Amino acid sequence: MRRRAVEGQRVDRGRGRLVAVIAAALVASVLTPGVAQAAPPANDDFDHAVAISGLPFTHEVDMGEATGAPDDPNPCHQLESGSAWYSFTSTEDVTLRIDVHDTYVETAIFTGTRGGLAWVPGTCESGWMTRELDARAGVTYYLKLAASPWQGLVRITAEAVPAPANDHFADRAVVDALPALNRVSLAAATVEAGEPAASCDLNPGSPSVWYTYTPVETEVIALDADSWGGHNAVAAAYTGTSLGDLTEVVCTGYRTLFRAEAGRPLHFQFNAAHATADEVVLGLRLAQPLRPDLRVSPEAPSIHDDVRFTDYSDDPEGGGTAIDELDFGDGTVVDPTDGYAYHRYAADGDYTARMTVSGQGGRTATITRTVSVRTHDVGITGFSVPATARVGTTRPLTVSVADTRYDETVTVTLHRGGSAGYQVVGTLTKPVPARQNRTVAFTFDYAFTAADLAEGTVVFKVVAEPAGVRDALSADNTVIAPAVRVLPARS
């Protein structure tokens, strides 16, 4: 028992010495010079901010061990993580473009001193995009860069953004011909002293650029203020020669059409309150012409028809059309407000109807249609049938047709009516010349049958139709004769 206890004490002493050796080795590894240890970046704290100087500027920072100080401001309220700090002071007003090169970080910019930092509104950015800072001369700005530890190494660059060449009215870019699509960055654009505020601008005082265009001919122009970009862009057109005598012609925050006079210069002011460094687009082009379309119903009217004229014109620019004038071609001119009108012609003839329509921007278009008025009218003036008839006999049924306007080819159809309704029993087609007080006879020979006797009486109906044309007055084209009493055959 004693020997075992002693051996146990030896084992415990050996284990203690081993733990002590391992601990000493760990301490030595931490304290030994030349052994690399994980540590926060040098600019981890506000007081050690890296100065952005000597533009263009490049710096790499490992955010894996970055920490946050208790007094670090966090106006963005998105990433609660370690941070690194940068400072920038310029001797002149400048727009600074900061790029984080496809790393996902959060940035915010401040002025002031530690414990009293003031956030620069609009400078909270999260993601991979570039950032811009409109820096004033002599003011020191502090950039806080925050990233999750997994982001690792971040490369940050900064450069001065030059103002656009057409930043001022006197340096406006010349548009030689349409269409013109002008892509521009407004990040470093400025507001010129005396520059007018466009009437439709919800953010007056936004930096702008200028263009000028002089139309050779009077034309309707489509002005597009980056309608697909979502940058709250505004474009305004002016006439005049200097900032002091500009007169606004049109203003749009989307797209508009307006008439431009030949030889009269137009000056375009273009801005976007939230464009920053993104590419924005000013579009100028000729407006597409209206496509006039006049439809007439019925297409072959008579003097008895109220002819409908309807505007089916189309505006490829997306606006509607209105009828300015509708000339029916017979001396009657109207200005309908509902897009259609009715008119009755007094005499047959060919009339040239003319419609003029207008659309947005003062565009107009004219279309003509030939309206051929023809009054075709045949009528049944008589239909003779026997009062009685016997089974087995054939009796004539005579139809008289008159026509006083045009020579027609007429088909007369004979219907037999009974308990089962009307059924066609014969047709005859003949030419019917246009003659006053003259008729053409259509005679049907009808054989009466036992089926007619079973009905007791038979009713006959005839319908006359001119070939290939519409009869203007169809009321006299159908006649029903008095019933014929059917008798048994003679025995």
Image (cartoon, rainbow, N blue to C red):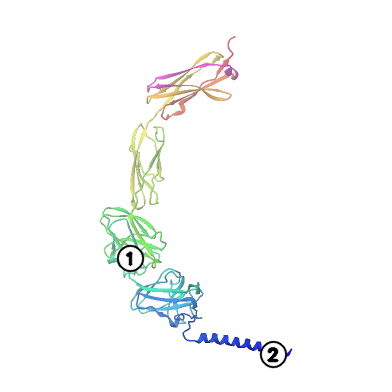
Q: Measured along the vertical axis of the image, is residue 378 above or below residue 85?
A: above
Mark 1 — residue?
209
* Neighbour tally class for label 2: few under 14, some 14-19, many 20 plus, Cα within 10 Å: few
Amino acid on which the number 2 mark rests in the picture: Val
Whether residue 71 sits left or right of residue 286 in the image: it is right
2 and 1 marks in contact (CB < 8 Å): no
Q: Is residue 464 visible?
A: yes
Mark 2 / mark 1, whichever is N-terminal: 2
Amino acid on which the number 1 mark rests in the picture: Val
Task: Identify the image quadrant of the N terminus.
Answer: bottom right
Whether residue 426 sits left or right of residue 252 in the image: it is right
In the image, residue 8 lies in the stretch drawn in magenta: no
Q: Is residue 113 visible?
A: no
> Which of 389/66 is in front?
66
- SS class of the residue under badge 2? helix
The Cα–Cα distance between marks 2 and 1, rounded to whole angstroms, is 94 Å
- SS class of the residue under badge 1? strand
Mark 2 — residue?
6
> Which of 229/318 is in front?
229
Q: Measured along the vertical axis of the image, is residue 176 above or below residue 108?
A: above
Task: Identify the image quadrant of the C terminus.
Answer: top right
Q: Position of residue 195 (x, y in %)?
A: 32, 67
Q: Nearer the viewer, mark 2 or mark 1?
A: 2
In the image, residue 430 lies in the stretch drawn in magenta: yes
* Magenta span: 429-454
Q: Which disc number belongs to residue 287?
A: none
Q: Measured along the vertical axis of the image, is residue 26 above or below residue 257?
A: below
